[in-house]
Image: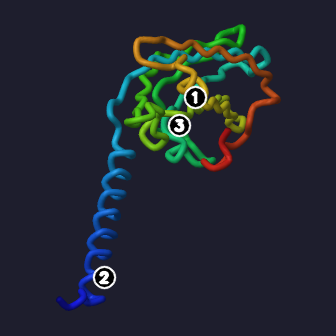
Amino acid sequence: MAPASIHHRRRWFYVLWTCLLLLSLGALVLWNLPTRTDQASLQMGVVIPDAPSGARVQVWAGPRARCPHPAWDGRGSLGEAALGPAGDARLPLLRVPIARRRWVKDFIPGRTWEIVLLRVVVPGQPDKFIIYPLTLDIRAGLLGPGRKLLITSQSKWAKLRVEVPPPNGLP
């Protein structure tokens, strides 16, 4: 009986590596497809006591990669509210989608709304911004299905950001 040729043995290695490659690609696809997408409720409250009169607050929420660029003009905002005489406002209830991975049940960053951006608009003045990362709230379970999270923030007018950083510079 003649020994198997080297080409015959190599063929088995090619089949093995092809199967491993297809298996890893399948696992990658399953890793990035959510097992479920839940809806969480988020209520934002803002208090800026020294804000100029006539100030309005607009809210945007979404994935970090789709955060509006520094010249966001308010298009695509999910809600708007006027600041009251005490500088407070309660924004409309947001339904935040949270896409969960299979196996580890962590959220998928590209398909989950993990950033909330507030734009404070005062006529005749440059816009100011407040940024809230929701990552820790999602991981801790505070922002999840069947729960309503209320975030109220108090800030001084002078401490607000004048421009939105690029997505890789967000908190």
Considering only vertical position in the picture, is 3 above or below 36? below
Q: Position of residue 48 (x, y in %)?
A: 73, 18
- Position of the N terminus by quadrant: bottom left
Question: Between disc 1 and disc 3, whose residue precedes?
Answer: 3
Give the residue at x 58% y 31%. 135
Q: Is residue 23 left or right of residue 161?
A: left
Considering only vertical position in the picture, is 79 above or below 11? above
Q: Position of residue 83 (x, y in %)?
A: 64, 16
The amino acid pointed to by label 3 is Gly
Q: Which mark is residue 80?
A: none
Q: Classify mark 1: helix, strand or loop.
A: loop
Quarter-of-image position of residue 11? bottom left
- Position of the C terminus by quadrant: top right
Q: Position of residue 61 (x, y in %)?
A: 50, 32
Give the residue at x 52% y 19%. 141
CA separation in Å, label 2 and label 1? 51 Å
Residue closest to the eye, 130 or 4:
4
Q: Which mark is residue 74?
A: 3
- Which-is-in-front pick, marks 2 and 3? 2
**Which residue is identified by label 2?**
10
**Which residue is identified by label 1?**
134
Residue closest to the eye, 20 or 100:
20
* Label 3: how many Cα within 10 Å (few below 14, some 14–19, many 20+): some
- Which-is-in-front pick, marks 2 and 1? 2
